[in-house]
Image (spheres, rainbow, N blue to C red):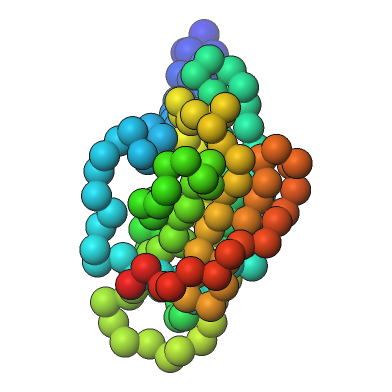
């Protein structure tokens, strides 16, 4: 009987530990509504290699963005998308792919990284294109067409 109780307790703890990452993945508020300024210590990543966007039209709607990018060196942390202010009438929402550079100097070896984020309460009706910028390039995604699109070149945000 004691073994059964221990086994049940271990199973319950394992289930709780497994669910912790799911709880931590709650969607963030849509950045333009959060009004939190981007962290100035974050550096723009070198290149955006791939961009995927998924939209869940639930209430509230959730926009999930996955960016495969390249950091200038290994050890970048706090990878995130920071919003760019732009013309609110152009229906484009622009982000910079950024991260915190490592404290210790290391060799300049380009390193692949992934940023995955979900935002809630996005203005789906006003969402035409999502663009993600890095130092060397930009990738866009047409929400209307459901496919990759070209970005218009813009000056760097840094």
Question: In terms of depth relative to the viewer, which is nearer, 143 or 80?
Answer: 143
Judge whether residue 56 can be spotted in this image. Answer: yes
Please provide percent x and percent y for residue 52.
66, 49
Q: In screen coordinates, is 104 left or right of 47?
A: left
Instruction: Identify the residue shown where x is 36% and y is 39%.
Output: 32
Instruction: Identify the residue shown where x is 51% and y is 86%.
Output: 109
Please provide percent x and percent y for residue 124.
56, 29
Instruction: Identify the residue shown where x is 62% and y is 26%.
Output: 56
Classify 82 as above or below 76. above
Judge whether residue 18 can be spotted in this image. Answer: no
Classify 48 as above or below 38. below
Residue furthest out toward the front: 89
Number of marks drawn:
0
Please provide percent x and percent y for residue 15.
52, 25
Question: In terms of depth relative to the viewer, which is nearer, 127 or 45?
Answer: 127
Picture quadrant of residue 47: bottom right
Picture quadrant of residue 69: bottom right
Instruction: Identify the residue shown where x is 61% and y is 62%.
Output: 151
Picture quadrant of residue 112: bottom right
Please provide percent x and percent y for residue 24.
42, 34
Residue furthest out toward the bottom: 107
Q: Quadrant of the C terminus?
A: bottom left
Question: In terms of depth relative to the viewer, which is nearer, 82 or 14?
Answer: 82
Q: In screen coordinates, is 31 left or right of 126?
A: left
């Amino acid at each position: 009987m004691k073994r059964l109780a221990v086994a049940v307790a271990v199973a319950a703890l394992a289930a709780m530990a497994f669910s912790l990452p799911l709880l931590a993945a709650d969607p963030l508020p849509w950045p333009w509504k959060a009004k939190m300024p981007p962290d100035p210590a974050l550096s723009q990543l070198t290149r955006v290699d791939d961009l995927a966007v998924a939209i869940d039209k639930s209430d509230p709607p959730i926009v999930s963005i996955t960016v495969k990018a390249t950091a200038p060196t290994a050890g970048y942390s706090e990878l995130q998308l920071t919003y760019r202010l732009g013309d609110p009438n152009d229906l484009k929402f622009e982000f910079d792919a950024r991260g915190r550079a490592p404290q210790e100097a290391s060799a300049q070896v380009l390193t692949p990284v992934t940023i995955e984020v979900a935002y809630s309460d996005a203005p789906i009706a006003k969402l035409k294109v999502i663009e993600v910028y890095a130092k060397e390039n930009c990738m866009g995604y047409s929400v209307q067409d459901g496919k990759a699109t070209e970005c218009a070149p813009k000056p760097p945000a840094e």
